Amino acid sequence: MSKKIKPLRVPVTQGLKDIYAMDMLLPYQAACEGRFSVTAFGRLAAAISVVRTALVKKDTHIPDAVATLDTTIGILSGIRTRGDTTDVWEITADERPAVLAGIEVAEACIGVLDVALLAQTAVMLQEQLARE
């Protein structure tokens, strides 16, 4: 009988946490300062979507995390529709608290994930986006 080999789990390092934080917080700050763009939007939306999808794939049971991220993604979807239609990229004052809540949840949850899961999730989401 052969011994089952567990896949290697490489924890998320502080450096990777910082990269994700910058991909979320810098675009949010730019939006608050009136310097939001489609590129900044893409970085923010991608980071939040990767963390949310990875949390679901790992079947984590962090109370309200996925629901909060789903709310944020819904708001970001509206921002994308508005931006695509008007070419004005902004997070309105009414949208900011929910977007910031999603950023904070994503930052708090990323530590329970692992590097391979985040990388696989990012590739999967990019492939889905390319097919749309």
Image: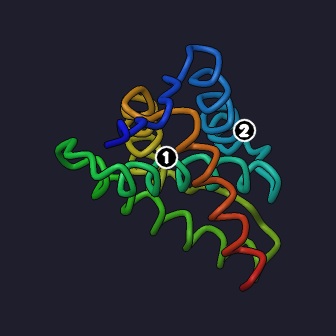
Of residues 66 and 100, the one nearer the viewer is: 66
In the image, taking residue 128 as reference, residue 39 lies left or right, namely right
What's under tag 2, amino acid-wise? Answer: Ala
Furthest toward the top, the residue is 14
**Residue shown at 35%/56% (left/top)?**
56
Q: Quadrant of residue 49?
A: bottom right
**Residue shown at 22%/41% (left/top)?**
62
Position above or below: 11 against 14: below
Q: How is the image coloured?
A: rainbow
Position above or below: 91 against 60: below
* Mark toward the start of the polypeptide (1 vs 2): 2
Q: Quadrant of residue 71?
A: bottom left
Q: Quadrant of residue 37?
A: bottom right
Q: Nearer the viewer, mark 1 or mark 2?
A: 1
Task: Name the residue carrying label 1.
Answer: 51
Crowding near pointer 1: few (<14 within 10 Å), some, many (20+)?
many
Position above or below: 109 against 127: above
Q: Can you give x and y, in whole percent of width and height, for residue 67 in the image?
A: 28, 58
**Residue shown at 31%/43% (left/top)?**
1
Q: Are marks 1 and 2 in contact (CB under 8 Å)?
A: no
What's under tag 1, amino acid-wise? Answer: Val
Q: Can you give x and y, in whole percent of width and height, for residue 125 in the image?
A: 63, 64
Helix, strand or loop for disc 1: helix
The label number, if any, that marks residue 119 in the structure image: none
Quadrant of the snapshot with the C terminus: bottom right
Q: Can you give x and y, in whole percent of width and height, for residue 99 in the image?
A: 47, 49
**Residue shown at 61%/51% (left/top)?**
120
Task: Name the residue carrying label 2.
Answer: 30
Of residues 86 and 57, the one nearer the viewer is: 57
